[in-house]
Amino acid sequence: MHKLRGTLAVCAALAVSAVGAGCGDEEEATGAASTGTAAAETAAPESKAPTGDPIKIGNIGGYTGPLAKTLGKGGDVLKAWVEDRNAKGGINGHPVEVIVKDDTGNPATALKAVKELVEEDQVVAIVSSFSFQESAWEKYVTQKKIPVVGGASTNPAFLTNPNFFASGTTLVPMLFGMLQETKKAGKKKLGVMYCAETPVCAQLVPLLQGLGKVAGVEVTGQKIASNAPNYTAPCLALKGDGADALFAAVTSDLVPRVTEACNKQGYKPTNVASGSTVDSAFLESDVMDGLVFAGSNALYTSEDLPGVQAFNKLIDEKLPEVRDSDQFSLPLIFSTAGAELFAAAAESAKLTPTSKPADLYEGLYALKDETLGGVSPPLNFVKGMPGATLCYFPQRIEGGKFVSDAVSCPDAATAKAIGAALGAG
């Protein structure tokens, strides 16, 4: 398990590059209201904004620093959700208050911020976490028994820690989904280009090889440096190795460059990815058309889903300036997914301003196949067990647009095989 967590940490670091942050003030409180679940958004009538003491929730993310472009508006989206929720009656007739903290991508800052949320602000939960410094504060919130509800579900803690409640597919099941999509595309061998800068990056290949045996896809790998003058050698090596699909497990800005370099060498494999390394900038690159990937949550383009409709309405009404900016990213919907998961659990637990985190846990355990208006795979949580779902969203870039299919879930035999593959990892 220690080796697996090390690999997950690397994968999460790669995921971070596709996610960003950049809020502004380190701390800001706001009030809001939306619907119990995203599915209810279109039907819920306007109601009088509640008054009185609020239900307090906390949020933390790397909103400034290296991830600002992709994650920077995550806190703003959550604040907009709270404002909208409060305008529609709050939760159980009570207003909601969110206190947003920016960890700046610094572990010490992250731990200090979380301690303030718990000890000074006395929040009932950390909601929609966009922090990639969870290793610094995971043990603390677990000891304090403060649930972490939703957010960037690809972070390792959501896969391994029962105190973290994922609002989407976690990292390893998403990687398996990527392999499944590779197989569905008719490809037999996946070439992985992984980072040379960190030795633990190499652990990604054996992990994928184990999962590949279950999915029926052979996996091979090549190490690359982000600052390499070109990628001719690894491209030709994978071509010679017969890899008919390519996973560039590098930062999202580097993926198109790697793909272009391989294309120039006459190597044009099918591009595949985990959803954590897909960036909206890919839509502007011709070489990325045809990319297939597995997503942890529904795409903002899946407008047939009530939860996606609610997300897009929130953006258009509360944050219209974000829609056309370079900070409008795929992960922003993770923020509302986490918020809706909290709302669903809070309603189930009949949460009030005087309720304790223990009450929220019971609300989370009571949820059954919760999809948050179609934004998430079916979610179920069992006390003492990580709440990782093996379901994922098959997704692709087609004609310069993101396209998502219905949720795909492995059968019982496949699920058992995945567990065995992870145990071997």
Image (cartoon, helix red, strand yellow):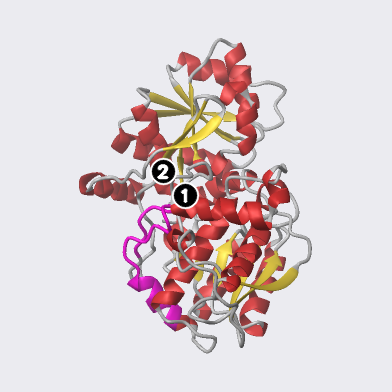
Magenta-colored stretch includes residue 376: yes
Give residue 88's position: percent from left, percent from top.
55, 71
Q: Which residues are magenta?
A: 359-380
Q: Nearer the viewer, residue 170 or 112?
A: 170
Quadrant, the N terminus: bottom left
Q: Position of residue 152 (x, y in %)?
A: 54, 55
Q: Is residue 242 magenta?
A: no
Give the tally of numbered discs. 2
Residue 313 shown left or right of residue 350 in the figure: right
Residue furthest out toward the top = 266
Towards the viewer: 133 or 316: 316
Please, what is the dominant secondary structure of the magenta stretch? loop
Q: Amino acid at mark 2?
A: Phe
Dot 2: element: strand
Q: Position of residue 13 (x, y in %)?
A: 59, 48
**Looking at the rendering, which quadrant does residue 135 occupy?**
bottom right
Residue, x 56% and y 47% (percent of image)? 10
Q: Is residue 216 above or below residue 155?
A: above
Identity of the amino acid at label 1? Asn
In this picture, is 301 found above or below 233?
below
Tell me whether the residue at label 2 lies in contact with that at label 1, contact meaning CB atoms closer than 8 angstroms. yes
User: Which residue corresponds to mark 2?
Assistant: 393
Q: Residue at left 54%, top 71%? A: 139
Task: Locate residue 105, reporting x and y percent.
Answer: 70, 57
Separation of marks 2 and 1 at Cα, in angstroms: 7 Å
Q: Is residue 400 above or below residue 1?
A: above
Q: Is residue 189 visible?
A: yes
Which residue bears the numbered disc 1? Answer: 297
